[in-house]
Amino acid sequence: MSFKKLTTDDINYFIQMLGAEKVLTDNENLIRCASDHTEDFHYKPEVVLQAETTEDVSKILHYCNEQNISLTPRGAGTGLSGGALPIFGGVSLDMRKMNKIIHLDTENFQVTVEPGMITEELQNAVKEKGLFYPPDPASKGSCFIGGNIAENSGGPRAIKYGVVKDYVLNLEVVMPNGDVMWTGANVLKNATGYNLTQLLVGSEGTLCVVTKIVLRLIPAVKNNLLLLVPFRNASEACKAVNAICMAGITPSALEFMERDAIECAVNYYQSSAVQLREDIQAHLLIELDGNYPEHLYKEAEKTSEIVAQYDIDEILFADTAEQKETLWKLRKIVGEAVKGNSIYKEEDTVVPRAYLPQLLECVKAIGKKYGFKSVCYGHAGDGNLHVNIVKGDMNDEDWNHKLPIGIREIFTEVVKLGGTISGEHGIGLVQKGYMDIAFNEKQIALMKSIKNIFDPKGILNPGKIFEAK
């Protein structure tokens, strides 16, 4: 794919269009937008443009489309599949200035927000009004709502509350040619034509740029309980997940951490909150929430009875807000902790929940076959297992050539189990070579034709999900 390289005339045009303060060519900003949280990739854009309004986005896209300049939308840069990397240079469209709540409609339980707002800030703002936005990615303190839309983010609370797509009612988007449109309506039910809103959620910035988002909210939940259950057998921990759900209990979070995962987090965080006995191989972090404490305590008792059927050690009940915060911190920093110890690759596998034990066993067997170590953790309640493959003492030849064969085998087994190759991180740059495992030629051709309809010149986030045409 050949895109136009930016000239001085192009930069001057952007300055005239946006103002010099929104056109960034200094090395610091180019480097900032050259990477995200995906491994150690670096692709510098030629310019960073900071949009502040929908009109800004429309003008930028219109010009780039006319001039055949590649454009990569960028949120907070917390992605794990390389979705925000400008691999063809061109424009990095920085959305951080579009960071406001436009309207909080407490009567209809809705909020209209710009894509550059930090997820946790949105959650806190609606909580003040007694409302709740449940999607809860690990990076919620820094990631943007727009990026969550692009990746259809999930997080721990998906088991009970669903993922981002379940809360998006309507989107204002800018097409690659600069046209602005709304995709739906601000209603809970909509059977009017094709569902463009849901098509665009999870499209990874390859079809359009989202400029306004209408989200549905729910009433805030008042109480929660948190349990940490240590298991002497990792497969039994996975089996206990389905047993809890089969008992009619729907935790607000049900997280799995094998021993290496929680040990890595404890060491990284320098925490004494969890005492790791030598015979413990995995933990389940179980959160129950609701408005009625007596009901929660009954669910906690029932959950304890279920896990007691397995080979477990003493259950830790988090008694204070501080203890709860510490346990959640340990869970959410696992990826960061693993990355701090070694070069790594993170695979985002997902299978039907009951097959989680088979998935874990399969990952370990393939790792043994190809000589790599994996640290596994994730959202066990919805079958989403994050597989962090650490380089360790693996030589470069095996890491670059042998490991991809092992990853392909893992993904092949995942699909055989009825799962797929990404649950919440997206395909982006790093997983596009495995799309043929999840889809046949006709399915891939259909997706490419959708991309072509939205973006016939292929300027928008090229090289993501599929190779640039």
Image (spheres, helix red, strand yellow):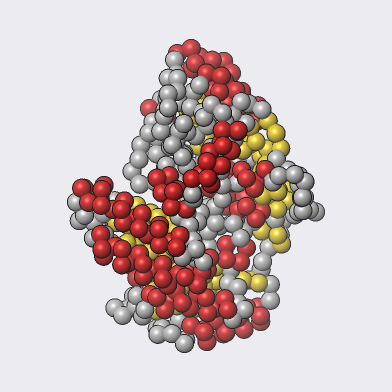
Residue 180 left/right relative to 208: right
Seen in the picture, residue 294 relative to 69 is either above or below; the reply is: below
Q: Quadrant of the N terminus?
A: top left
On screen, residue 154 versus residue 259, left or right, reads right
**Left or right relative to 345: residue 105:** right
Query: Please, is residue 223 above or below residue 428 in the view?
Result: below
- Residue 423 sits above or below residue 57 on the image: below
In the rendered image of this protein, does residue 255 appear above or below residue 404?
below
* Residue furthest out toward the top: 9
Q: Residue at x 48, y 17 (%)?
A: 11
Give the residue drawn at x 70%, y 56%: 217
Question: Could you say where residue 410 lies in the image, as x and y percent from the top left?
Answer: 37, 59
> Which residue sits furthest right?
107
Res 375 visible: yes
Instruction: Tell me where residue 234 appears, x and y as whole percent.
Output: 38, 75
Regarding residue 255, the answer to whether it shows in the image is: no
| Residue 369: image location, x then y, percent | 25, 63
